[in-house]
């Protein structure tokens, strides 16, 4: 058994310190200065007490990480959490996350230090887990109040984030088995708001994942209170600020319903156009505190490196046939085919939506074994949920979708993306392409193929320049 020592003892050989009770600030400083950092000094504690974060923050992690690097070892996610927070507050490894991704390595010290943060990193890089780890480090499950709020642009993304949060919440920690569990409420458009009202009245959840419209309904009726909120996350933040339907409610949430001084604010996205301007606005508009940190991971490679970008030229009329030839030669097990929104003119003319046209075409002409599914805004919420739950059940599928599936949706088995219509902007291209290549430590090559009309070549070239990637021409 390890000897029990006092904080004032000289401890040159100690590599790990186990804190069995909460030390005083001075006691901890003494202990910290007496432990030699020539070894990997990790501090373990038996409960999750925040004051330690103030004392042992990112410099200690840098030291631990440097030492590990020198020895040719990689730090695990659990070690990072331990080094900064001094507590294995939940078992990240048990739920399948052992090694941190780049964004997690870079963002966790900032997030755990309590500073506001703009998380700006590739699609599929693990931003969700980074902000969820922060949330799980600050919440106190003994308190019955909403302590963290995650705002997402779509119901589909909300369901996904809720699932990950519940998976982490359900995992009991070694020392906290007798603790009350953390509850996660999904307050999403198309949900059963009456049921949520009763839930909120009976006992507020610890974490709320919400779309902005449903959230504002609850806030306006004073059914949901944010005075105990410690962390506010806005996922896909650029999309939310660009959406005419969501922006005014978002601004209200950031400045009227709560104040940046009483919460830690995290904005996340793979794309933050004009990020310096956005950073300036964050401070000027008081969406964040002044010392907000922009964590920009791998800015010269905004999309995962395992993506191979290709394009095929054809006339508008040949588009379906070209797609069919591509599918026959690629034989993808699972993929998404993106189709542009139907124009108002086409709607007025009474034409069928292009998504339906394509689904009908594929169902009659594509003989591949994948199931053909549809996901678009105009479907009712039940059909949308049914489509996504079918794709999540595994098996091969081809999902024909509008840009509703372009943001945040995480389907790691997808290896092929087809742009049946060229996206309208480079940012849209980035998010569509980012629905594949979503296994952070895999080298598996994934394809993004755009079917373009000859006159669209220069638009695609512009996207290539803006996003710094190369697109190869395919001749069928
Ligand atoms: N440390 C990790 N180890 C292994 N897998 C991870 C790790 N962190 C995240 N993942 C997995 O990586 C995938 C992508 O993560 P996530 O959905 O958070 O990406 P993202 O950065 O939010 O992407 P997007 O910008 O497209 O929304 C998920 O399947 C997630 O489970």
Image: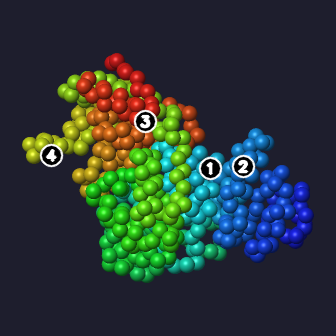
* Dot label at residue 344: 4
Q: Is residue 106 left or right of residue 412?
A: right
| The C terminus - image quarter | top left
Q: Is mark 1 within 8 Å of ligand 1?
A: no
Look at the numbered disc 3 and say if its residue's Cβ is closer than 8 Å to ligand 1: no
The answer to whether marks 4 and 1 mark residues whose Cβ atoms lie closer than 8 Å is no
| Label number found at residue 105 | 1
Query: Mark 4 against mark 2, which lies toward the viewer?
Result: 2
Left or right of residue 65, residue 148 in this image: left
Q: Which mark is residue 65?
A: 2
In x, y percent, where is residue 239? 36, 52
Q: Residues within 10 Å of mark 1 (few under 14, many from 20)?
A: some
Please say if the residues under marks 4 and 2 sit with CB atoms less than 8 Å apart. Answer: no
Q: How far, Cα to Cα, is label 2 from label 3?
A: 31 Å
- Residue 168 seen in this snapshot: no
User: Is the residue indicated by label 4 positioned so its CB lies within 8 Å of ligand 1?
Assistant: no
Q: Residue 199 placed where, x, y %?
A: 41, 76
The residue where tag 3 is placed is 467
Out of 33 and 476, give the one closest to the viewer. Answer: 33
Identify which residue, 276 or 194, lies in the foreground. Answer: 276
Q: What is the spatial separation of the Cα atoms under label 4 and label 3, in whole angstroms?
A: 30 Å
Q: Position of residue 414 (x, y in %)?
A: 44, 39
Q: What is the secondary structure assignment of the residue under circle 4?
A: helix
Estimate the x, y position of residue 404 in percent, counting from the top left: 32, 49
* Quarter that holds the N terminus: bottom right
Instruction: Of the two numbered discs 1 and 2 on the same chain, state the one appearing first in sequence.
Output: 2
Asked if residue 130 can be seen in this view, the reply is: yes
Q: Residues within 10 Å of mark 2 (few under 14, many from 20)?
A: many
Q: Which mark is residue 387?
A: none
Measure the alpha-carbon separation of dots 4 and 1. Answer: 46 Å
The structure residue drawn at horizontal position 40% and vertical position 46%, both measured from the top left corner, is 273
Whichever of labels 4 and 1 marks the residue nearer the N terminus, that label is 1
């Amino acid at each position: 058994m390890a000897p029990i020592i006092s904080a004032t003892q000289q401890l040159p050989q100690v590599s790990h310190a186990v804190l069995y009770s909460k030390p005083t600030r001075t006691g901890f400083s003494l202990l910290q200065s007496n432990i030699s950092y020539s070894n990997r000094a990790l501090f373990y504690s038996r409960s999750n007490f925040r004051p330690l974060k103030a004392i042992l923050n990112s410099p200690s992690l840098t030291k631990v990480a440097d030492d590990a690097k020198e020895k040719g070892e990689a730090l695990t996610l659990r070690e990072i959490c331990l080094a900064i927070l001094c507590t294995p507050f939940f078992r990240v490894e048990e739920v399948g996350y052992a090694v941190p991704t780049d964004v997690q390595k870079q963002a966790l010290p900032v997030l755990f230090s309590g500073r506001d943060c703009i998380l700006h990193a590739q699609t599929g890089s693990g931003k969700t887990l980074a902000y969820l780890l922060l949330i799980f480090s600050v919440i106190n499950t003994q308190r019955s109040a909403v302590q963290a709020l995650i705002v997402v642009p779509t119901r589909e993304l909300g369901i996904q984030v809720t699932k990950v949060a519940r998976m982490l919440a359900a995992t009991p920690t070694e020392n906290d088995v007798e603790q009350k569990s953390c509850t996660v409420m999904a307050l999403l458009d198309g949900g059963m708001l009456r049921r949520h009202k009763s839930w909120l009245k009976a006992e507020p959840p610890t974490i709320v994942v919400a779309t902005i419209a449903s959230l504002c309904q609850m806030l306006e009726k004073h059914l949901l209170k944010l005075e105990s909120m410690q962390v506010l996350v806005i996922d896909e933040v650029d999309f939310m600020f660009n959406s005419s339907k969501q922006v005014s409610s978002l601004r209200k949430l950031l400045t009227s319903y709560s104040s940046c001084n009483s919460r830690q604010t995290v904005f996340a996205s793979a794309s933050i156009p004009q990020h310096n301007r956005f950073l300036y606005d964050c401070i000027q508009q008081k969406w964040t505190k002044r010392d907000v940190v922009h964590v920009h991971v791998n800015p010269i490679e905004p999309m995962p490196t395992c993506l191979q970008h290709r394009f095929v030229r054809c006339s508008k009329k040949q588009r379906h046939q070209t797609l069919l030839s591509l599918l026959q030669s690629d034989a993808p097990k699972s993929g998404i085919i993106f189709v542009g929104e139907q124009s108002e003119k086409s709607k007025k003319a009474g034409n069928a939506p292009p998504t339906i046209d394509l689904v009908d075409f594929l169902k009659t002409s594509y003989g591949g074994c994948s199931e053909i599914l549809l996901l678009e805004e105009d479907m009712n919420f039940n059909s949308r949920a049914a489509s996504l739950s079918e794709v999540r059940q595994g098996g091969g599928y081809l999902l024909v979708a509008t840009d509703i599936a372009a943001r945040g949706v995480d389907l790691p088995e997808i290896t092929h993306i087809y742009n049946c219509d060229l996206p309208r902007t480079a940012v849209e291209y980035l998010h569509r392409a980012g629905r594949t290549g979503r296994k952070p430590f895999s080298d598996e090559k994934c394809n993004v193929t755009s079917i373009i009309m000859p006159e669209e070549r220069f638009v695609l070239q512009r996207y290539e320049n803006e996003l710094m990637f190369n697109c190869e021409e395919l001749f069928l």
